[in-house]
Image: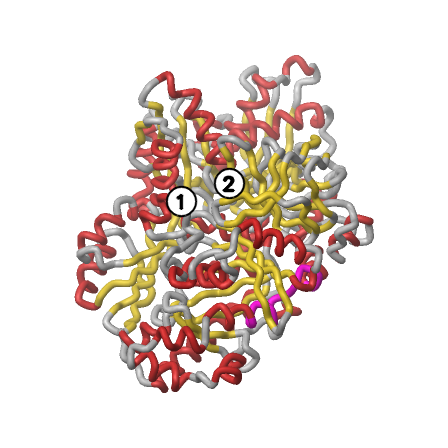
Amino acid sequence: MARKEDVVKRAAELMNKLDKIRNIGIVAHIDHGKSTLTDNLVASSGLMSQELAGKQLIMDFEDQEQQRGITINAANISVVQELNGEEYLINIIDTPGHVDFSGEVLRAMRAVDGVIIVVDAVESVMPQTETVIRQALKEYVQPVLFINKVDRLIEELQVTDEQMKERFVKVIAQVNTLIKNNAPNEFKNKWTVRVEDGSVCFGSAYHNWAVSVGSMKKTGIGFKEVYDLINSDRQKELAEKSPIFSVLTEMVINHLPSPVEAQKYRIKIIWGGDEESEIGKAMITTDPKGPFSMMVTDVSVDPHAGDIATGRVYSGKIVRGAKLRLVKADREINVQKVGVYMGPDFVEAEAVPAGNIVAIVGAKEVYAGQTIASYEIKEFESFKSKAEPVMTVSIEAKHTKDLPKLIEVLRQLSKEDPNLVTTINQETGEHLLSGMGELHLEVNQYRITQHHKVPIEVSPPIVVYHETINKSSRTVATKSPNRHNHFFLSVEPMPRELLDRLIEERIEAKIRPKDKEIVAKLQEVGFSNDVAKKIWMVHNHNVLVDVTRGIQALHEIKELVIQGFADAMNEGPLAKEKCYGVIVKLEDAKLHEDSIHRGPAQVLPAVTRGIYGAMLSADAVLYEPKQNLAITVPERFMGSATKELGSRRTQISEIRSEGDASIIIAKAPVKELIGFSAAIRGATEGRAIWTAEFSGYEILPRELQKQIIAEIRKRKGMDPEPKPASFFLEG
């Protein structure tokens, strides 16, 4: 086996040969074989034993990944591969398949230019496969396809040679439909995957073999030979004659772009600055001699080295000792170390040029999504995703002396995982941990107690609801406590399509007249030019619009109106849950001429109460988070599984048979999925495999509104019944 340092040395030489670099991600639904596939690429470069490839799962190095048998963290490794006598550097990111960790996949897509989509030949395209394909294509990342576990088709389903080919055709068609529906217009046809050009290959990552049209010509091993060899239990022979790493390497190098090709079309999508500027040209041409620019895609906190920021270098070169700017924080950083990740290990390098994935030590208080550059530039675009935390637990240190350490650990965890949100309940002093689902929260609770050694007490999970409105309100009037200031407001629901785009763009800002870029982005989202120019704030996917005319002194209280709006959107009138999808219009105001009578104590409650009154008169309702489920269960447990789903307000949209197993596709409320993992295991004797994917918020059934509102209010120490609209408004 080769030493990592030797591989890094060879990699360092190739880092400067931009046409010989491929930055790729491995993406798939959970348990379709990503980490097993990565093993084979790693083994072929000499970093691990060929015999262990597919079994060791070298990239799943955290203890929980090994115990649970799933990938939790996106992990990087650089391997050197050879094709036609030429060496290539392949920077690989192995990504999680479980939906609770889809944020890891999204961030990885910014660092790569191509992906290998892995699909289980038996299960075909599953919900998370669809999600990761969409994520890749939104980031202008080109796909190729590996159909894995072909041996299962023959050994378990006992298909014929012809049925096997039919299954392949079906999977390729499913993937190409997703590509055509989600790819950028200019690449819809170019990026579809085809057997005939070698952008699709077939095999078994566990048994270390694969075939493609290109490999068939070289080895003479076609589908018939594959079928016969598997049928006669000779997969080892198959792996010797047509090794998987050789087929994959050829597919990656021939079909996925180098940084030089990819950055020509990707920069204009991921960076909104001036393409004709010095740094713009350097990024588009991947110029290692130009000004330095990098986007941080991942942060890990090392107990000795501190924050380690991993990301993609788009222009320039980074060397140890460099002084750079952390753009959003507007401060200088000193780069103490430069290197690359080889699985769990940080391996130092002298320098890393444009077109590569780098890890740096010395960027303190850095977060995923930030831009690092040699001088102040426009930041890279934020990651686009509709996913958001849907479940919360309250965490307390068992021993008071551990409280400072717990606060530090929570800060560290939320830095490493931007999808994990930590807040403090100001009334109770509890620490609230919000995540993408039960598993996401369990994994982080384990890290707190086992990795960081802080004993904690954890509450049962609480579901995050949203408050919104179903119709427009009339114009309502509200007075300040001193009765000297009057505000006239109305609210209306945001159209669904507009709301979806606003959520995806993740715009969160106070908007000043000079913020022309944000105004332009709001116009792109779907607001009319006139409305976009009048928006004062976007907060929690709600907007505050000023439609007043010529009110004297309004500019003096603008900040207070904005704060009152934010307060109302943070804690709605029904149950103090976050509001979303509400357009608040300030229509008129009568203000006291003396500024002393229109301070914060007067304006803030007046605005917040006015918004509450308007929302309550516009059919305010709770929306609940829902998740799409994919459950694979043996046929004989089908009745038990559907019975369990039926008791949880689940809508089943599809049931299909794959051999002796059934796959159920359904949608369920997150609240009903608390404890589902243990229940479905019990109902199916542990045979069910299931995943859930966030599908957005939908209205809570009318018959449950009153009950759930009362439950939430009681938990928060309020009266069970919310106040009526008249309580907040002028008579």
From the viewer's perspective, is the residue at label 2 or at label 1 nearer?
Answer: 1
Dot 1 amino acid type: Glu
Q: Secondary structure at mark 2?
A: loop
The residue that label 2 is drawn on is 418
Dot 2 amino acid type: Pro
Disc 2 crowd rating (10 Å Cα; few below 14, some 14-19, many 20+) is some
Q: Is residue 193 visible?
A: yes
Magenta residue check for 450: no
Position of 633 compared to 573: left or right? left
Q: Is residue 331 above or below residue 129?
A: above
Magenta segment = 250-261
Q: Is residue 386 visible?
A: no
Q: Is residue 425 above or below residue 265?
A: above
In this picture the colour scheme is secondary structure
How many marks can you see? 2
Q: Residue at x 59, y 49 (%)?
A: 505
Q: Residue at x 62, y 33 (%)?
A: 362
Whole-percent x and y of residue 589?
A: 64, 28
Name the quadrant containing residue 349: top right
Residue 62 is marked as 1
Whole-percent x and y of residue 386?
A: 50, 50
- The foreground one among 676 and 4 is 4
Q: Residue at x 49, y 62 (%)?
A: 41
Spatial CA distance of label 2 from label 1 is 19 Å
Whole-percent x and y of residue 264?
A: 72, 61
Name the quadrant containing residue 658: bottom left
Whole-percent x and y of residue 276?
A: 82, 53
